Image: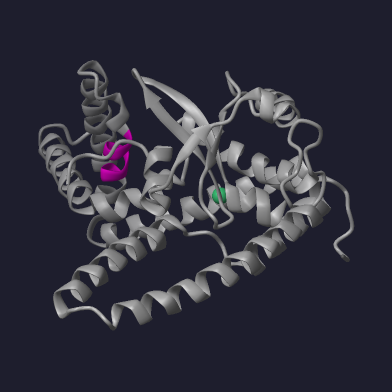
Amino acid sequence: MAPQKLLSIEDIVHPFYNSQERPMGRHEAAAVFDWMDKQAKLLGLEKTPELWHVEHDLPNAAGGFAKHEGRKIGRVFLTRGMLERVFDSPNLNHHVPAGLKGLLGHEMQHVSEMMSGADGMAMRKFPLFAFPLVAMTGYTLYTKAQDRKIQDSSKSLDEHLNAVTEEQQQKMRESGRGDQVDMLEWSKRMALAGGVGLVGGSMIAARMSLNAEFRALAAEVRAAGGAEPCIEVLHKMEKASAELVGPRLQQWTADLSKRSFMDQMSEFYKLVRHELRASTMHKHPSTAEQINHMRKVAAEELGQGLAH
Ligand SMILES: [Zn+2]
């Protein structure tokens, strides 16, 4: 597979929804944009991210960036289901509910990290799909470092490996492939880990991904001014999703059983592809973990009691 670009919002939203989306204007969400302006400054973002509306029933949100003419444009997505089912279609010109602030705060934190290229979210997909490439590159870096070690034994293998990797990264930047330097960083780590590199790499990725999620949860709590509004949103999302997805899956199974074998197989593969994406992209902590983390942040950073 080709070297990965960093995860953009197109990668997140399209595979899931494949549905209509549009940028929202200030005229329809003035209060939200005012709030996002302030939040963007707090997060050190150069520009307030765009706010996009996704035409889908399921309540969900995403944050990331799109690339336009070499520039990264921060974007936060909200589905129609989120606004209708979780927030009862609020008037976004007048008021931003605390839970929505939390949700946007969460996604804006992801945007902020993705824009700076330091985001573990990007790694959710990255190592799984690019593992063979990363492993091969890691092996190449390791071989080069070993050759140098034979010529110059005053430095350790690790030092040679670091030097070789930095040189290659520099070459990439010079040839306009700066967005691929992360791939080399992963390859180096894998080379450092040696035989257990493959396992180690995926564990690091999972950890980074989880850490990114916890940082976003902390931002969510700060933005909402406490854990409770965020927890309420979480519960409403779960309830609405279960109500929607359950019957649809039943219907899908019923429909499928009426079709020919070939039809069934192609449908099956479509579902597997979808599920595979969903499972690699949706490495969110469990609800209980999310709630624990939000309560902890609220207690530690906002000075609120744990006993809710
Ligand atoms: Zn998140």
Give the position of the C terminus as an image quadrant. Answer: bottom right
Does any portion of residue 118 appear in the rendered image?
A: no
Q: Residue at x 75, y 48 (%)?
A: 99
Magenta residues (range): 182-188
Q: Residue at x 36, y 79 (%)?
A: 253
Image coordinates of residue 16 in percent, x first then y, are 41, 53
Q: Quadrant of residue 107?
A: top right
Image coordinates of residue 103 in percent, x first then y, are 67, 46
Residue 98 included in the magenta stretch of the image:
no
Residue 187 included in the magenta stretch of the image:
yes
Instruction: Pick the residue in front: 289 or 72.
Output: 72
From the viewer's perspective, is residue 169 above or below residue 186? above
Image coordinates of residue 186 in percent, x first then y, are 31, 44
Q: Residue at x 35, y 58 (%)?
A: 277
Label tally: 0
Colour convention of the picture: one colour
Instruction: Pick the residue in front: 59 or 288.
Output: 59
Image coordinates of residue 86 in percent, x first then y, are 69, 55
Q: Main secondary structure of the magenta part?
A: helix
| Left or right relative to 143: residue 242 | right
Q: Quadrant of residue 255?
A: bottom left
Does any portion of residue 9 appear in the rendered image?
A: yes
Instruction: Pick the residue in front: 144 or 277.
Output: 277
From the viewer's perspective, is residue 157 above or below residue 246? above
